[in-house]
């Protein structure tokens, strides 16, 4: 039986519908793919460390403040490994101490490797590790230079605290001849101070340092101050150090800001990151930090715009630099 023209046209109509549907589906898939956030991996440190906790907080700030990316944190073995992974593209961003970042950028580490340290750059500073000398208020001590002739703990040999103590002692002319020096660990130092075995203990660590905070809750303590000319001399000894202001109230009974020195722990990336992404991350760090880092008091410094983007030991990524300049934060 001969088919009518209507039935002969059905296949053509179906083909046309299928073709249009296919195009629409492809366009939808393409659009969905375009809207999918860029996945970024973040190197941190071992669980329980400050770098790991800070990394988780910073990742939340970025993920909630910049929808074009999604950051997944990764456990790592700390700053030296993070430097290598960022430069070689194994990690998109990472938490890296200021001293390690500077040494890599200044080509003082990794010389046996093929990676280029000048590819390392910063997106912002997250928290400091800084010099903190604590004493009991009843001691009458106010300044670090008053420690000459006292009994003090300078940190264990080859530790970052001991290295910082050595720079301080060279500046203030303190040595084993004129002062009784002990090489105790940080918590041991706090215990020794509590037990009256020493007059002051030094920590080059996050602020507040838990053992010192507990001590300050038990008895009235003071954080000893540096004089301005002393700070200038100390800072000249290490280009990765900078002024750090420990805000009043960071420790129980701390009534005023304490100006000291230390290093910033940075969120770093490679110069390979595109400017739009770096700009968006910097904006998220600025606008979302207070909300997502507030649970960690050692990260309160991040809310200080000067701390966030000035006096860094390595250059800012151009995209981050542009954001901070537009926001009016850059010196």
Image (tube, rainbow, N blue to C red):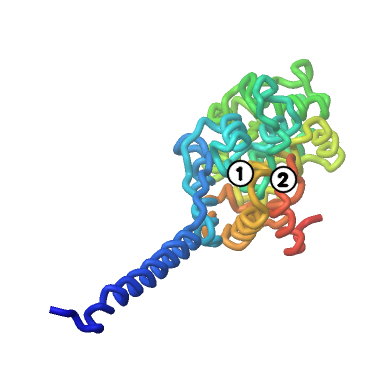
Decide which of tag 2 and tag 1 comes sooner along the chain: 1
Q: Position of residue 178 (x, y in %)?
A: 78, 19
Give 80 or 39, whichever is nearer the viewer. 39
Residue drawn at point x = 52 percent, y = 53 percent: 38
Picture quarter with the C terminus: bottom right
Residue drawn at point x = 27 percent, y = 73 percent: 11
Q: Position of residue 192 (x, y in %)?
A: 57, 27
Q: Is residue 202 above or below residue 208?
A: above
Q: Is residue 290 above or below residue 167?
A: below
Give 301 or 319, whichever is nearer the viewer. 319
Q: Few, some or many C-alpha atoms within 10 Å of disc 1 (few <14, some 14-19, many ≥20)?
A: many
In what element is the residue under mark 1? Answer: loop
Please identify the residue farthest to the left as the structure is shown.
Answer: 1
Q: Position of residue 174 (x, y in %)?
A: 79, 24
Position of 306 with respect to 37 (left or right) is: right
Pointers 2 and 1 in contact (C-beta within 8 Å): yes
Hey, which quadrant is residue 275 in on the image? bottom right
Q: Is residue 17 above or below residue 155?
A: below
Residue 240 visible from this viewpoint: yes
In what element is the residue under mark 2? Answer: strand
Residue under numbered circle 1:
207
Q: Is residue 97 above or below residue 290?
A: above
Residue under numbered circle 2:
244
Picture quarter with the N terminus: bottom left
Q: Position of residue 240 (x, y in %)?
A: 74, 36
Q: Few, some or many C-alpha atoms within 10 Å of disc 2 (few <14, some 14-19, many ≥20)?
A: many
Total marks in image: 2
């Amino acid at each position: 039986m001969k088919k009518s023209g209507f039935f002969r046209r059905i296949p053509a109509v179906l083909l046309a519908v299928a073709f249009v549907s296919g195009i629409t589906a492809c366009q939808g898939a393409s659009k969905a793919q375009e809207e999918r956030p860029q996945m970024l991996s973040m190197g941190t440190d071992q669980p329980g460390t400050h770098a790991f906790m800070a990394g988780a907080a910073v990742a939340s700030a970025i993920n909630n403040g910049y929808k074009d990316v999604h950051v997944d944190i990764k456990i790592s073995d700390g700053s030296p490994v993070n430097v290598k992974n960022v430069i070689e593209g194994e990690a998109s961003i990472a938490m890296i101490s200021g001293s390690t970042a500077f040494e890599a950028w200044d080509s003082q580490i990794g010389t046996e490797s093929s990676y280029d340290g000048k590819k390392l750059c910063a997106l912002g500073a997250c928290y400091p590790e800084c010099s903190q000398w604590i004493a009991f208020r009843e001691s009458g001590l106010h300044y670090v230079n008053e420690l000459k002739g006292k009994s003090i703990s300078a940190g264990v040999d080859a530790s970052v605290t001991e290295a910082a103590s050595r720079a301080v002692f060279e500046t203030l002319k303190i040595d084993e001849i004129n002062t009784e020096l002990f090489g105790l660990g940080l918590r041991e130092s706090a215990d020794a101070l509590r037990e009256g075995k020493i007059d002051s203990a030094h920590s080059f660590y996050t602020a507040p340092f838990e053992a010192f905070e507990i001590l300050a809750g038990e008895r009235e303590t003071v954080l000893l101050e540096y004089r301005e000319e002393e700070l200038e001399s100390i800072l000249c000894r290490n280009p990765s150090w900078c002024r750090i202001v420990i805000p009043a109230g960071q420790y129980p009974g701390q009534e005023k800001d304490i100006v000291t020195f230390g290093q910033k722990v940075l969120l770093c990336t490679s110069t390979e990151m595109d400017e739009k992404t770096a700009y968006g991350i910097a904006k998220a760090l600025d606008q979302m930090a207070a909300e997502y880092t507030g649970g960690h008091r050692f990260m309160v410094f991040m809310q200080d715009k000067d701390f966030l983007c000035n006096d860094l030991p390595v250059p800012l990524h151009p995209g981050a630099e542009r954001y901070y300049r537009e926001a009016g934060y850059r010196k």
